[in-house]
Image (cartoon, rainbow, N blue to C red):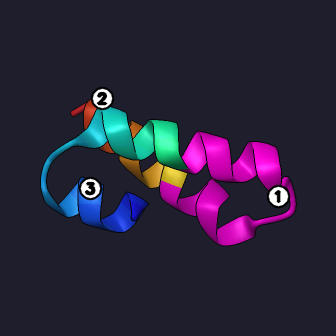
Amino acid sequence: MGEILQRQGKLEEAIAYYTEALELSPGLDIARAKLQEVESLLQL
């Protein structure tokens, strides 16, 4: 879902999704990587 939001340009929503995923499963490395990716896109 986070990836879909990211592709749609809804970066803040994608961040919220990945953050929630990490709260539920802190060891979910793919969610952590995607969160960092989206956060870096916001800084551009």
Which numbered disc, 3 or 2, marks the residue that appears first in the sequence? 3
Q: Which residue position holds label 3?
A: 6
Label number found at residue 41: none
Q: Which of marks 3 and 2 is in front?
A: 3
Quick check: 31 left or right of 5?
right
Q: Residue at x 50, y 59 (%)?
A: 34
Q: In this view, does 30 lie above or below 41?
A: below
Q: For the image shown, how many numbered marks are present on the structure? A: 3
Across and down, in percent, residue 24 comes to 80, 51
Occupied quadrant, residue 6? bottom left
Helix, strand or loop under label 2: loop
Q: Which residue position holds label 2?
A: 43
* Callout 3 crowding tier (Cα within 10 Å): few <14, some 14–19, many ≥20: some
Across and down, in percent, residue 12 comes to 33, 32
Q: Which of marks 3 and 1 is in front?
A: 1
The range drawn in magenta is: 18-34
Q: Residue at x 73, y 50 (%)?
A: 22
Which numbered disc, 3 or 1, marks the residue that appears first in the sequence? 3
Quick check: 26 left or right of 17?
right
Query: Which residue type carries mark 2?
Result: Gln
Q: In this view, does 31 lie above or below 21?
A: below
Across and down, in percent, residue 9 comes to 14, 48
Q: In this view, does 17 lie above or below 1?
A: above
Q: Which residue position holds label 1?
A: 25
Q: Magenta includes 31?
A: yes
- Of residues 42 and 28, the one nearer the viewer is 28
Q: Main secondary structure of the magenta part?
A: helix
Quick check: 30 left or right of 3?
right
Which numbered disc, 2 or 1, marks the residue that appears first in the sequence? 1
